[in-house]
Image: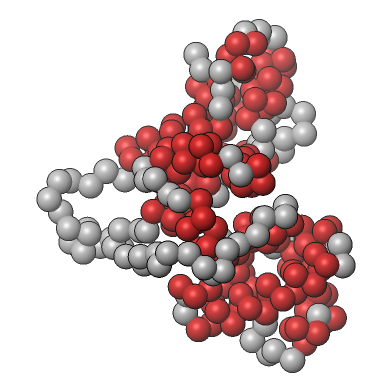
């Protein structure tokens, strides 16, 4: 068995109630789906999770199984699961199936990356090291496309240009807030805001000069136009010292 297969087995057994979660993991939710989502949010290190489950069960997994695991493996497996569950009969147009038009490869790439915190950390690490070979490999697995890293960074850095007016206004205001907090080295506050904690946002809104005179800047506004998109990842990238080019070749929006 691969490490990913062990991971799926342990997750399934915990959700079914036939295996206790390892120390530090709290099983939440009344249905298997809810419990699975809760587990996925808490498991940020797949090898460590598998090792903890194996240790509690008295199961020895060979070290070479851990060594052979890469985060790209998880992406491949998740992409395969999505393909199985979202299969569309041939020759049926998107409109007939009640579906949205095909997503841009950048959107597909980010939707895959945002499935797992470990993949987010891996992407940021690649960009920090400017390991473009690893980036191309990741884009091929996550989006089945060859994505140029500079075009991708331009897109991330100018996301609001592709959104509606309300989204653009929210992005400009919140970016200014996060830029100031980063300059003041208030990283704990940044983390709390990005986690979506409502109390933190409400308190911050009362003292943030960027938001005080903006009646629309409510918690729901922040969740809808900022937290629900790629903007939090852009903040994390900036916190990691990643910069975004101001010019690049025009990127197709179709």
Outermost residue toward the left in this view:
91
Q: Position of residue 112 (x, y in %)?
A: 48, 46
Q: Is residue 92 left or right of residue 177?
A: left
- Quarter of the picture containing the C terminus is bottom left
Colour scheme: secondary structure
Q: Position of residue 84 (x, y in %)?
A: 32, 37
Please tell me which residue is depicted at 53% across the width and 36% down the height of the picture: 134
**Does residue 123 appear in this view?**
yes
Q: Position of residue 48 (x, y in %)?
A: 69, 26
Vertical side of 213 occupied by 241: above or below: above
Please tell me which residue is depicted at 51% across the width and 33% down the height of the picture: 72
Question: How many marks are shown on the rendered structure?
Answer: 0
Vertical side of 163 occupied by 150: above or below: above
Q: Position of residue 95 (x, y in %)?
A: 21, 64
Please tell me which residue is depicted at 82% across the width and 59% down the height of the picture: 187
Residue 15, quarter of the rendered image: top right
Q: Is residue 67 left or right of residue 155?
A: right
**Does residue 202 appear in this view?**
no
Vertical side of 91 occupied by 174: above or below: below
Please tell me which residue is depicted at 78% across the width and 62% down the height of the picture: 190
Q: Is residue 1 left or right of residue 236?
A: left
């Amino acid at each position: 068995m691969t490490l990913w297969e062990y991971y799926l087995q342990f997750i399934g057994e915990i959700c079914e109630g036939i295996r206790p979660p390892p120390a530090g993991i709290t099983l939440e939710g009344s249905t298997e789906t809810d419990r699975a989502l809760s587990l996925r949010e808490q498991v940020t290190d797949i090898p460590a999770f598998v090792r903890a489950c194996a240790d509690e069960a008295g199961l020895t997994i060979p070290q070479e199984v851990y060594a052979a695991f890469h985060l790209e493996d998880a992406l491949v497996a998740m992409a395969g699961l999505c393909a199985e569950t979202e299969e569309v009969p041939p020759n049926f147009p998107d409109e007939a199936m009640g579906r949205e038009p095909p997503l841009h490869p950048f959107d597909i790439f980010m939707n895959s990356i945002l499935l797992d915190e470990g993949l987010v950390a891996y992407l940021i690490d690649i960009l920090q090291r400017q390991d473009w070979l690893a980036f191309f490999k990741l884009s091929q697995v996550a989006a089945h496309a060859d994505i140029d890293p500079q075009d991708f960074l331009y897109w991330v850095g100018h996301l609001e240009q592709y959104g509606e007016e309300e989204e653009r206004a929210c992005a400009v205001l919140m970016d200014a807030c996060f830029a100031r907090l980063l300059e003041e080295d208030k990283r704990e506050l940044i983390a709390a805001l990005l986690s979506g904690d409502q109390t933190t946002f409400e308190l911050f809104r009362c003292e943030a000069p960027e938001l005080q005179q903006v009646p629309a800047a409510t918690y729901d506004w922040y969740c809808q136009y900022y937290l629900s998109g790629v903007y939090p990842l852009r903040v994390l990238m900036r916190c990691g010292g990643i910069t975004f080019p101001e010019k690049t070749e025009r990127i197709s929006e179709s």
